[in-house]
Amino acid sequence: MSEYSRFAVYFLPEGDLAEFGATWLGWDVDQGAPVAQPRVDPLGDRIEKITNTPRKYGFHATIKPPFRLADGVSQRDVEDAMAEFASSFAPVHLQSLALSQIGRFHALCPTGDVTALNAMAAACVTELDHLRAPLTDDELARRRKHRLTDAQNALLEKWGYPYVLNEFRFHMTLTGSVKDADRDDVLAALDSVVPDLPQPYALQGIALVGERADGMFQTIHRYTFSG
């Protein structure tokens, strides 16, 4: 039996951006270990609360959302499928990444054409779906509390998550829901610590991550796009 309760496919950055994300969120997903968070002015010690929601997942962009294994599927099966998938795709090039606000949370989002990125993400969701156990009634009910549209509900029922395919938006989450009173301080703090981002920005591969017994996500293996 696997030590992980769920699996997911992430894009995980490398280098300065990975180091920034681990420090900002207080969790290094590659090492599976907490990291001391900075006290960045003007946010100060509010950073811990503001990053509490995304911390358990690590700094990432979700490509295939967390899923339980289908009956008869092992972790090795998932790893083999991931390796085969990555070998069929070339690196994905974005114009760059930029600090953005999505609803009430903040994230790094791509700029420019995202056609190739969205196609890769859609293929990952659909081609690896045989590995995923169907959602339980309780899981469906929890997702439906978020006022889904008819299209999102249809995606939830078919693919296990409402924000995939046509509803997908690549983003690397930096905060949970931010109150209006904190928004300017959060943006000022992020502007001072987000590293310079290459233009273009290349996604060289994807990663398989697992949810541990303590609820934290940890990298299992990175896969390089080699197609």
Image: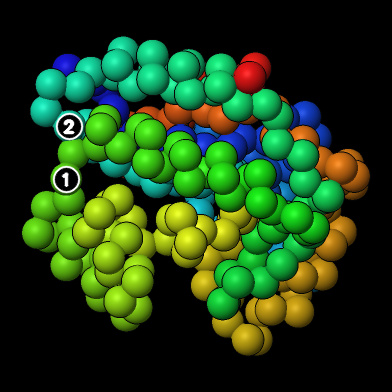
Tell whether 105 sits left or right of 214: right
- Mark 1 burial class by Cα count in 10 Å: few <14, some 14-19, many 20+: some
**Where residue 210 sits in the image (x, y, percent)?**
37, 31
Q: Which image quadrant: the N terminus?
A: top left
**Where residue 120 sits in the image (x, y, percent)?**
56, 40
Question: Which three-letter amino acid code belongs to the residue tagged 1?
Answer: Pro
Q: Which residue is mark 1?
A: 134
**Res 37 seen here:** no
Tell whether 164 sits left or right of 33: left
Q: Are marks 2 and 1 in contact (CB under 8 Å)?
A: yes
- Mark 2 burial class by Cα count in 10 Å: few <14, some 14-19, many 20+: few
**Which picture quadrant has residue 105?**
bottom right
Q: Residue at x 48, y 46 (%)?
A: 122
| Picture disc at residue 70 | 2
Q: Residue at x 56, y 17 (%)?
A: 87
Judging depth in this view, the residue of 13 and 189 nearest the camera is 13
| Picture disc at residue 106 | none
Whether residue 202 is situated above or below residue 190 in the rendered picture: above
**Where residue 178 sits in the image (x, y, percent)?**
58, 75
Q: Which image quadrant: the C terminus?
A: top right
